[in-house]
């Protein structure tokens, strides 16, 4: 079974997911999980203020592997992707995502 959650359900802006999960685990706010691990994805894409880009392209592909029993981050994967249709990020996109070229 695969359950997909939107990134905003897991974290706000640059919130440290692993730290939040560990702290919540310590305070008993999480139920015991039957899953061995969770993969947390948080894509970033090309963007512009008040403009809908077409196509909107992925520019960052991060993934965390969280142990389902301990809720501790076990592995990370992170790659930047150069957009093909909008190869130069807008100032708005740089400010919003923190991604520099």
Image: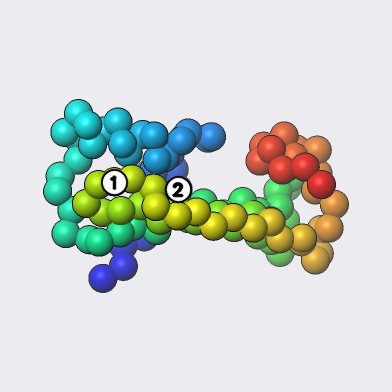
Q: Residues within 10 Å of mark 1 (few under 14, many from 20)?
A: many
The way the protein has been coloured in the rendering is: rainbow
The residue that disc 2 covers is 7
Return the x and y of residue 26 as percentages of the image width and height. 22, 31
Outermost residue, front direction? 74
Instruction: Identify the residue shown where x is 16% and y is 33%.
Output: 28
Name the secondary structure under disc 1: loop
Residue 90 quadrant: top right
Instruction: Identify the residue shown where x is 26% and y is 71%.
Output: 1
**Res. 6 visible in picture:** no
Above or below 12: residue 61: below
- Residue situated in front as seen by the camera: 30 or 95: 30
The residue that disc 1 covers is 71
Q: Residues within 10 Å of mark 2 (few under 14, many from 20)?
A: few
Q: Is residue 61 left or right of residue 24?
A: right
Residue 85 quadrant: bottom right
Q: Are marks 1 and 2 in contact (CB under 8 Å)?
A: no
Above or below 1: residue 86: above
Q: Is residue 14 left or right of residue 58?
A: left
Q: Is residue 92 left or right of residue 37?
A: right
Outermost residue, right direction? 88
Instruction: Identify the residue shown where x is 16% and y is 59%.
Output: 34
Q: Is residue 5 left or right of residue 59?
A: left
Name the secondary structure under disc 2: helix
Return the x and y of residue 44 as percentages of the image width and height. 61, 51
Give the foreground label among 1 and 2: 1
- Residue situated in front as seen by the camera: 39 or 57: 39
**How many numbered discs sit on the rendered protein?**
2
Q: CA distance from mark 1 to mark 2?
A: 17 Å
Instruction: Identify the residue shown where x is 32% and y is 39%.
Output: 21
Return the x and y of residue 100 as percentages of the image width and height. 77, 42
């Amino acid at each position: 079974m695969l359950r997909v959650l939107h990134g905003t359900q897991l974290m706000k802006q640059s919130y440290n997911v692993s730290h939040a999960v560990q702290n919540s685990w310590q305070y008993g706010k999480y139920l015991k999980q039957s899953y061995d691990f969770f993969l947390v994805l948080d894509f970033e894409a090309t963007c512009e203020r008040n403009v809908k880009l077409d196509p909107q392209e992925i520019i960052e592909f991060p993934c965390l592997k969280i142990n389902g029993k301990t809720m501790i981050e076990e592995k990370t994967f992170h790659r930047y992707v150069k957009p093909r249709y909008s190869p130069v990020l807008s100032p708005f996109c740089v400010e919003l995502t923190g991604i520099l070229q």
